[in-house]
Structures are given as structure tokens and as C-alpha cells.
């Protein structure tokens, strides 16, 4: 079965992860300027709701939060859980 990459679910997934990626960029900028920061809890909640890929990529592109054990271990684990859940949803017919 071929998956349509322009399916609404896939577009939503990409936009959601782009937003997570942007959140990391904004938090990095705010950290440099000693401004109000995005809460760590917000990053983890966003990651749990299928946004872990964007946050993980953002962490390493912007070198942000990579020294925090909870992020360097937790976000990759959430990313794997996201991918497994996405696969299960796809196999059950909920996606595509």
C-alpha cells in the first residue's frame, strides 16, 4: 500500500513538528537574551502529542537543551514512542 504524503494527517504531522522545531529556536533566542523562556513541561507535552521529531531535530540544529539529561534521553524515547504509535495507527487504518 502506497501512502499519500499529502494526506491531511501527514500535512498536520509536518506542521506540528515544524512548530516544535520553531519552539526550540525561540527558546534558544530567549535564553541568549535572558528573556522569558518556554517551560520544559511545554516541550515534553508537545513532544508527547506527536511533536518529538521536530523538537529532537531542533535540539541538535540549534544546540539547545542537549546537555539536559531529561531532554537528551527523554525526547528520543518519546520520538520512538511517537513513531511506533503512528505505525500502529496506520496499520489499524486510522491514518491514510
Image (tube, rainbow, N blue to C red):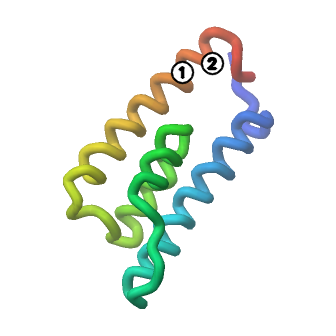
Q: Quadrant of residue 76?
A: top left
Going 30% across and 53% down the picture, which residue do you hit?
71
Compared with 54, 27 (above or below) is: below
Compared with 92, 6 (above or below) is: below
Q: In which quarter of the image is residue 35?
A: bottom left
Q: How crowded is mark 1: few (under 14 residues within 10 Å), some or many (20 or more)?
A: some
The reply to whether the C-beta atoms of the residues labelled 2 and 1 are less than 8 Å apart is: yes
Q: Which mark is residue 49?
A: none
Compared with 88, 5 (above or below) is: below
Going 60% across and 18% down the picture, which residue do you hit?
89
Going 25% across and 50% down the picture, which residue do you hit?
70
Q: Name the residue under label 1.
A: 87
Q: Is mark 2 on a helix, strand or loop?
A: helix
Going 39% across and 37% down the picture, which residue do you hit?
78
**Percent x, y of residue 61:** 40, 67
Q: How many numbered circles are shown?
A: 2
Q: Quadrant of the N terminus?
A: top right
| Left or right: 60, with 2 as reference point | left
Q: Which residue lies furthest to the bottom in this view?
A: 33
Q: How far apart are marks 2 and 1 (CA)?
A: 5 Å
Q: In which quarter of the image is the C terminus?
A: top right
Q: Is mark 1 on a helix, strand or loop?
A: helix
Seen from the viewer's position, the closer of residues 30 and 18 is 30
| Left or right: 31, with 11 as reference point | left
Q: Residues within 10 Å of mark 2 (few under 14, many from 20)?
A: few
Q: Mark 2 points at which residue?
A: 90
**Percent x, y of residue 80:** 39, 33
Amino acid at each position: 500500500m502506497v501512502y499519500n504524503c499529502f494526506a491531511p494527517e501527514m500535512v498536520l504531522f509536518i506542521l506540528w513538528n515544524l512548530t516544535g522545531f520553531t519552539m526550540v529556536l525561540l527558546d534558544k533566542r530567549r535564553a541568549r537574551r535572558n528573556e522569558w523562556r518556554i517551560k520544559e513541561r511545554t516541550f515534553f507535552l508537545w513532544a508527547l502529542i506527536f511533536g518529538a521529531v521536530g523538537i529532537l531535530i531542533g535540539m541538535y540544529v540549534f544546540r539547545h537543551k542537549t546537555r539536559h539529561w531529561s531532554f537528551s534521553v527523554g525526547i528520543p524515547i518519546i520520538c520512538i514512542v511517537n513513531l511506533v504509535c503512528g505505525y500502529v495507527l496506520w496499520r489499524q487504518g486510522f491514518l491514510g
